[in-house]
Amino acid sequence: MSFIERLEDYYSNQKEMNWQGTFKDYLEILRDNPQVSQLSHARLYSMIKHAGVKVEGDVKKYNFFRKELFGLEKPLEKLVDEYFHPAAKRLDVRKRILLLMGPVSGGKSTLVNMLKKGLEEFSHTDDGAMYGISGCPMHEEPLHLVPKELREEFMSEYNVYIEGELCPYCRKRLETDFNGDIMKVPVERVVLSEDDRVGIGTFQPSDPKSQDIAELTGSIDFSTIAEYGSESDPRAYRFDGELNISNRGIMEFQEMLKCDEKFLWNLLSLSQEGNFKAGRYALIYADIMVVAHTNESEYKAFIANKKNEALQSRMIILKVPYNLKVSEEIKIYDKLIKESDLKDVHIAPHALRVAAIFSVLSRLKESKKQGMDIVKKMRLYDGEDVEGFKQKDIYELQNEADEEGMSGVDPRYVINRLSSALIRTGTKCINPLDVLRAIKDGLDQHSSINKEEREKMLNFISIARREYDQLAKQEVQKAFVYSFEDNARVLFENYLDNVEAYCNGVKTKDPITDDEIDPDERLMRSIEEQIGISENAKSAFREEILIRLSAYARKNKRFNYRSHERLREAIEKKLFADLKDVVKITTSTKTPDAEQLKRINEVSSRLVEDYGYCPVCANELLKYVGSLLNR
């Protein structure tokens, strides 16, 4: 489909959103689809659930958030299960303001923008369809037309809950334009839009001396007073404040805790009773999900003020900490870089990883658990196997450090430094060392970092460098292994034959002479020692391998060296160790002979084709690993 055809198709779909009818027509729609009358919290919950949910272990991952937010599964699960879900059931939690609290650049604003944008898109779908009284400035629910005396009967027949009363404007129109006949009141489909100020609003406080409360609640239209004769006539009032236009949807209250008291008073009534005061009218009903965000220091100052106790009791606090997973942090940087004009600059493998390692280390708290250091903790959090610990230990570690993730290096700092590295190099590629150098240079420009904090940061950079050194050596060694998979398979099968013979107390056959010989202890230990299996633990490890082998056989599945994570690591390390001298000589020689030059070119090509390097960073990697192996 061409762009013009897509454009025509888009506007054709937009026309379908322009449904209009009467209140009687709306009741027919409602009978077939009661969901169209959902309240705001229920609509937001439906929107999130509509996108789907994936359960991994004991963690729920909501698809709605997965493209923009990374490493925040727990806070998001809490948001949906402990706030939106009960609020959708009309429990008391819906009468609370949602306050997102966390460090700068932690994803709070992104989360709010996703909810607003998602609600817009959801209102275009059949599942998210909603309707309002045509011409109402607050796009209010047509069911407000049902008289109070008949609502119980209506709810019994339609199985639909009615909450709220007509706004002053619609009450006046019903009387003057329709002679009280609710069946003639026009109804239209409502499509939410922040740009059009329909159902989605944002309030940002400014100078309290000049900012008017009208920005929240609307104001008198003095040009129409002569026509309608009174300031109390709702037709002479502009219902265009953020609380008016946010009805049926969501309002973001930016910098709420910095706001002047007179603006917060409206929230007291709105959050608890679902209404607010405007002009010379009775309390106006509003169905709004109010969300605000702040940092920890501002929140502590807010709760320290006794005058704020009433509003504080009407809040639900959701902590939004920094991400603590290296793999998820990489996704954050990758997303931000792809949004820039530097998409064509090649970023070498592991360049974003070293930046992520540095960031995550700065956010972690030291554990008092014996044998657990900060690097092991980082790996465990990222789903890696750590000797002596299991994934179930993460829960205990998290409880040990309740404030973990609420401080540390923010993603903006790292992205700023990555930007500096991308621009400064003047090349088409940056490598992990360029990234670490840029991060280090940035510390010198940070006047707010004291000497102790700087030493900590330098230590994290050193750890990230050591982690990269290991990755770099492994990458080059892998590339040097010709037919690596075949070599690994042969070594694995040889090891497995000897382990079976050892555990069963039998001999093996020499492949050449067919003589019966004892299991090759030297071979087995040379592999097991690569992952620190002690002499005392070797029997248990070998039996574990056989048990895993039997389990695979029962399920008719093939057991290979990748089927056991630690055995895979041991096999690879053994192969790397056997090739170390070859790699060392080839990468470090200044005058390679024809054979060495051929091997270097082959390795470089393999790094480019199989591992994501470009010719520039592949060459830099070989030089760097050569220097590492010669130390």
Image: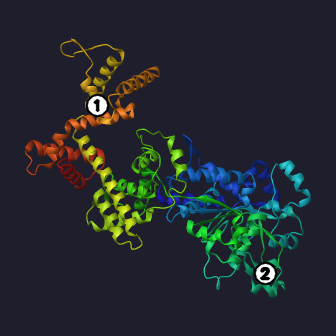
Q: Foreground: 90 or 51?
A: 90
Query: Hey, what amino acid is under mark 1?
Result: Ile
Mark 2 or 1: the one toward you: 1
* Marking on residue 527: 1
Q: Is residue 168 left or right of residue 320?
A: right
Res 98 → quadrant:
bottom right
Pointer 2: what residue? 236
Query: Hey, what amino acid is under mark 2?
Result: Ala
Res 261 → quadrant:
bottom right
Task: Give residue 617's position: percent from left, percent from top.
Answer: 25, 54
Q: Foreground: 614 or 443?
A: 443
Taking the view exactly as shown, the residue that stands out farthest to the right is 149
Q: Foreground: 315 or 201?
A: 315
Mark 2, secondary structure of its residue: helix
Q: Foreground: 357 or 113?
A: 357
Taking the view exactly as shown, the residue that stands out farthest to the bottom is 226
